[in-house]
């Protein structure tokens, strides 16, 4: 048996609890709640008190819960039979306290140097947090941390590298006077600039999935791309979540990112999916000319996937949220809705409004007006979920970002009429057409293109309206003159 000990100080009541659900690849977790600090040696010596608590919890499970938690009973029975030792068989200790308190506790309990110490609270990726971590816990090589985007725990040195990588990207993007959508597109280009590569045989799957390992290594798969993109968006104040899908009839999964974007510069507000993997790096830089997985509505993305995936994050929600809610409510009642739709709907409401829409008590005990409020909110969400980004707006966003990328690195980022033409023709955005065609495009969530010639004509028209040729010529000429000037100055 292998276990983890979880210690929390400053609780109102002292208690000891054994759980069958393990953490950190363990078989059991031993929860210790203490009203004040107690040395680790004194905790170990509290065996009689611990057994007393265990017997009480065991009896409660048998009597009140009628032995429902079978695995927990097995753990208790093994302990009572002395088949494992709570402390000797627990190599991992999680401490719920501040950085300074954990530091002080480790200094006062030197025997813990032989244990794997886990800081209980997940860390953000801010420089201020990094400085605090290094100040109080930098000297301990047995302390591990949780970080958003990681399954694996990491040490101080890898946490520092992760923070530096993320902050470098954030500072790089923030130096431009970007609108929200422009920030997202530049972030998309940076996040996809690595080739898809699975972990090697014998390596943990987290090598290609965890934020830290994909930033510091060369392995990355869909969830790795999603973790990087999602974390950067959050630090740029773009509300986002990792959007998980699973294969229909297959044991396969996929991860993309869903983001809520309100951009006054382009007069657009909506909720969009981003599949970074779809447009990830290839052998040359031509992958920067394709945005097939960029800013598509949920329905557009499902059409792109040819319905081979089902929605795991928003399970139970059809293309129309109001219909999903009302049909469930009328057929099964509010309890069913709360059990089956509350979590996916609240994920969406937290993304858009920063709060949960479906709350159990008000919806069960209040009058009918609450249902009307829910319906009104869902109608607004439906509009946001179906507000497709059109080709004309996308071209403006791409141009404003790509000219900065081109100034940074002209040999890497394509900046020509052909490059923009390719980006528009390969990325699946809807072109402005007649009112009738626009109506059908919205219904079917896809661009109505009759032929390759028709597509090329739409692209040419879009580029012409934006006066793109003149803009591209101006940027490339300015960059060429700058390079000539710098070359002359360097030769002086």
Image: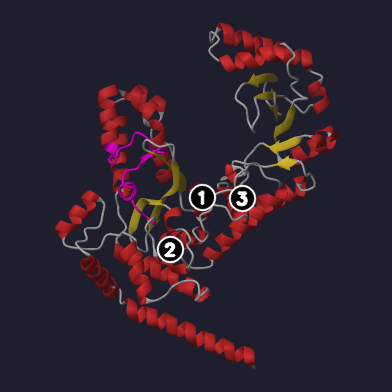
Q: Position of residue 454 (x, y in %)?
A: 21, 67
| Front disc: 3 or 2 | 3
Q: Which residue is drawn at 51% across and 55% down?
A: 196
**Real-space CA distance between mark 3 and mark 2, rounded to the nearest whole angstrom:** 25 Å
Residue 302 magenta-highlighted: yes
Where's the C terminus, which quadrant?
bottom right
Q: Which residue is drawn at 50% across and 75% down?
A: 411
Is 317 above or below relative to 442? above
The residue beneath circle 2 is: 182
Callout 3: SS? helix
Tag nearer the camera, 1 or 2: 1
Looking at the image, is mark 3 or mark 1 nearer the viewer? 1
Q: Magenta includes 46?
A: no
Kindly check if marks 3 and 1 are in contact, taking CB atoms under 8 A apart as contact: no
Which residue reaches farthest top? 63
Judge by depth and name the residue closer to the eye, 352 or 391.
391
Mark 3 sits on what residue? 212
Q: What's the residue at 52%, 54% (across, down)?
A: 232
Mark 2 Cα-neighbour bin, 10 Å: few <14, some 14–19, many ≥20: many
Disc 3 from disc 1: Cα separation: 13 Å
As drawn, 207 above or below 475: above
| Distance between the alpha carbons at the discs numbered 1 and 2 | 25 Å
* Mark positioned earlier in the residue sequence (1 or 2): 2
Label disc, if present, on residue 280 of the rendered structure: none
**Element type at mark 2:** helix
Question: In terms of secondary structure, where does tag 1 sit?
Answer: loop
Would you say 424 lies left or right of 102 here?
Answer: left
- Residue 243 visible: no
Check disc 1 and report the residue beneath it. 221
Total numbered labels:
3
Magenta-tinted stretch: 294-322
């Amino acid at each position: 048996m292998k276990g983890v000990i979880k210690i929390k100080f400053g609780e109102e009541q002292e208690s000891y609890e054994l759980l069958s659900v393990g953490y950190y690849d363990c078989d059991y977790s031993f929860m210790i709640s203490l009203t004040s600090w107690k040395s680790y040696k004194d905790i170990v010596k509290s065996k009689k008190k611990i057994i007393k608590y265990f017997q009480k919890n065991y009896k409660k499970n048998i009597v009140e819960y009628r032995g429902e938690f079978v695995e927990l009973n097995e753990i208790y029975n093994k302990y009572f039979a002395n088949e494992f030792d709570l402390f000797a068989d627990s190599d991992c200790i999680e401490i719920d306290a501040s950085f300074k308190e954990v530091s002080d506790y480790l200094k006062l309990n030197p025997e813990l140097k032989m244990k794997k110490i886990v800081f209980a609270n997940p860390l953000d990726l801010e420089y201020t947090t990094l400085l605090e971590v290094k100040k109080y816990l930098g000297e301990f090589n047995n302390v591990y941390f949780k970080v958003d985007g990681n399954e694996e725990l990491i040490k101080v040195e890898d946490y520092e590298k992760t923070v530096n990588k993320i902050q470098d990207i954030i500072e790089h993007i923030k130096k431009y006077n970007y609108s929200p959508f422009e920030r997202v597109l530049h972030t998309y280009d940076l996040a996809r600039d690595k080739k898809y590569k699975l972990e090697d045989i014998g390596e943990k799957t987290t090598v290609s999935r965890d934020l830290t390992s994909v930033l510091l290594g060369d392995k990355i798969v869909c969830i790795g791309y999603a973790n990087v993109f999602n974390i950067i968006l959050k630090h740029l104040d773009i509300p986002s979540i990792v959007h998980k899908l699973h294969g229909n009839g297959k044991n396969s999964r996929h991860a993309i990112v869903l983001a809520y974007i309100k951009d006054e510069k382009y007069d657009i507000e909506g909720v969009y999916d981003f599949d970074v993997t779809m447009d990830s790096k290839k052998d040359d830089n031509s992958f920067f000319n394709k945005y097939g997985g960029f800013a598509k509505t949920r329905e557009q993305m499902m059409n792109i996937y040819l319905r081979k995936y089902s929605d795991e994050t928003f399970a139970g929600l059809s293309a129309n949220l109001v219909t999903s809610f009302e049909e469930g409510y009328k057929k099964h009642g509010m309890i069913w809705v709360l059990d089956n739709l509350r979590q996916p709907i609240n994920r969406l409401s937290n993304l858009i409004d920063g709060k949960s829409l479906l709350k159990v008590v008000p919806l069960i005990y209040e009058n009918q007006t609450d249902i009307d409020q829910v319906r009104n909110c869902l109608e607004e969400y439906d509009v946001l979920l179906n507000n497709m980004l059109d080709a004309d707006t996308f071209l403006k966003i791409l141009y404003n970002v790509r000219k900065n990328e081109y100034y940074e690195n002209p040999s890497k980022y394509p900046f020509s009429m052909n490059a923009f033409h390719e980006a528009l023709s390969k990325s699946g955005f809807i072109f402005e057409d007649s009112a009738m065609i626009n109506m059908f495009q919205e219904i079917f969530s896809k661009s109505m293109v009759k032929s390759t010639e028709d597509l090329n004509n739409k692209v040419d028209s879009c580029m012409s309206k934006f006066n793109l040729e003149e803009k591209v010529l101006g940027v490339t000429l300015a960059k060429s003159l700058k390079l000539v000037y710098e070359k002359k100055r360097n030769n002086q």
